[in-house]
Amino acid sequence: MIIGYILLSWFPNARDSFIGNLLATFTEPYLRIFRRIIPSIGPIDISPVVALIALRFVALGLFAVIEFIFGRFAG
């Protein structure tokens, strides 16, 4: 969803469409956290990239915890 929202920024008025508004509803609360921390570099906003990296680390951490828990029961 974040990648789709980023791609919509490349097209004029695409974020004003139904899909743009729908994606904004779901992604903006998460991206707003990173926009407060990371300033944009001129017209370039790198907070979505950092948000995706953070989301990846969270996913890897969850998989490690699940593997640890189920590894205890299996072994």
Image (cartoon, rainbow, N blue to C red):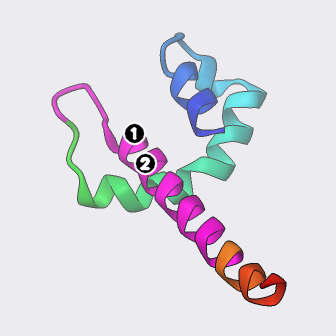
Quarter of the rendering occupied by the C terminus:
bottom right
**Residue 48, quarter of picture:** top left
**Residue 23, quarter of picture:** top right
Residue farthest to the right, as pictured: 74
47 to the left or right of 25:
left
Q: Which label lies toward us, 2 or 1?
A: 2
1 to the left or right of 34:
right
**Magenta stretch holds residue 51:** yes
Please name whichever residue, 12 or 46, is drawn nearer the observer in this view of the structure. Answer: 46
Up-down relation of residue 66 to residue 36 (above or below) = below
Q: What's the magenta region?
A: 41-66
Up-down relation of residue 61 to residue 40 (above or below) = below
Q: Residue at x 66, y 38 (%)?
A: 1
3 to the left or right of 1:
left
Q: Which residue is mark 2?
A: 53
Q: Main secondary structure of the magenta part?
A: helix
Amino acid at circle 1: Val
Residue farthest to the front, as pictured: 75
Amino acid at circle 2: Ile
Q: Position of residue 52 (x, y in %)?
A: 48, 46
Residues under numbered marks 2 and 1 in contact, where contact means CB atoms less than 8 Å apart: yes
Q: Badge 1: few (under 14), some or many (20 or more) residues near its Cα, within 10 Å?
A: some
Q: Badge 2: few (under 14), some or many (20 or more) residues near its Cα, within 10 Å?
A: few
Q: Residue at x 16, y 28 (%)?
A: 42
Q: Position of residue 32 (x, y in %)?
A: 43, 56
Which mark, by number, is residue 49?
1
Please name whichever residue, 37 or 12, is drawn nearer the observer in this view of the structure. Answer: 37
Q: How many marks?
A: 2
28 to the left or right of 40:
right
Q: Residue at x 83, y 82 (%)?
A: 74
